[in-house]
Image (spheres, grey):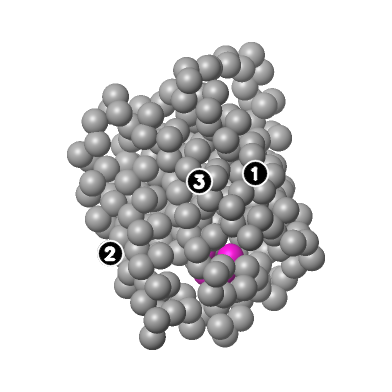
Amino acid sequence: MNFVFAGTVIFLVSALLQGLSGFGFSILAVPLITLFIAPKTAVPILMLYSIIINIVVLYSARKEVDIKKIWILLLAGIIGLPFGARLLVTLDGNILKVGIGILILIFGTLLLLGYRKELKHEKIAMIPIGIISGLLSGSISISGPPIIIFLANKQLGKHSFRGNLALYFFLLNIFTIPVFFLNGLFTKEVISYSITFLPGLIVGVIVGNLLSHKVQEQHFQKFTLALLMIMGVLAIVSGLK
């Protein structure tokens, strides 16, 4: 019962965070839920939950969604997915957590301090960014940081930022399903836990989505970047432990 309660709280808070900011679900949930269950069980659960969360966020920000802004990122992410799934099966995910955590802190700090870099060849730059995101999605279910940093650098509006992130995550997760299935990651344990913690997830994302409309535009980007840096610290701590 203690595990059920802890898992419900973890997914409720993580989903609330994603509903509010458009990201953060997996980065917060992964280091916490893997204290109780193995990463190979946790990652498929997070992927299924992420689909549900992003449907809600997508509906909320549907007027600001533009697939033209993310289609190159998405195609590149799909390319990286199967390689990430193989890493989940064969590699220690802690190495990846520490590496991505360090990168998040470096780029998050630069953006928070006001550094912006106009990309002369933006479409070309999207290819490695998307591939890294897909690799991380398939391996540790943390696909967000490369895409978040890219979109934050573009200084999109609050709802455009949330909506396009949700569309990217949703479509990438849809393509992740067959990849995980072929690698034998959808076990009875995964399905059982997914059903158990679903109520907490739904409550969290609905509350977070409602709160998102109360955050002022001028404070949203600073909040997003500060949150991103906290996620970087969590990823490093989780990987080291």
Would you call the spot at circle 1 few (<14 residues within 10 Å), some (14-19), or many (20 or more)? many
Determine the CA span between mark 1 and mark 3. Answer: 10 Å
Magenta segment boundaries in residue numbering = 42-46
Distance from disc 1 to disc 2, alpha carbons, whole Å, reads 29 Å
Q: Give the secondary structure at mark 3.
A: helix
Residue holding disc 3: 231
- Which tag, 1 or 3, sits closer to the chain's start? 1
Q: Which mark is residue 91?
A: none
Q: Is residue 223 above or below residue 32?
A: above
Residue under label 2, please give it. Answer: 203
- Residue located at (35% from left, 59% from top): 13
Whether residue 20 is in magenta: the answer is no
Q: Residues within 10 Å of mark 3 (few under 14, many from 20)?
A: many
Residue 47 drawn above or below residue 222 = below
The type of residue carrying mark 3 is: Met
Three-letter code for the amino acid on which mark 2 is drawn: Val
CA separation in Å, label 3 and label 2: 22 Å
Q: Nearer the viewer, mark 1 or mark 2?
A: 1
Residue 176 in percent (x, y) is at 61, 59
Residue 23 percent coordinates (x, y): 44, 46
Local secondary structure at mark 1: helix
The residue indicated by pointer 1 is 100
Q: Amino acid at mark 1?
A: Ile
Q: Secondary structure at mark 2?
A: helix
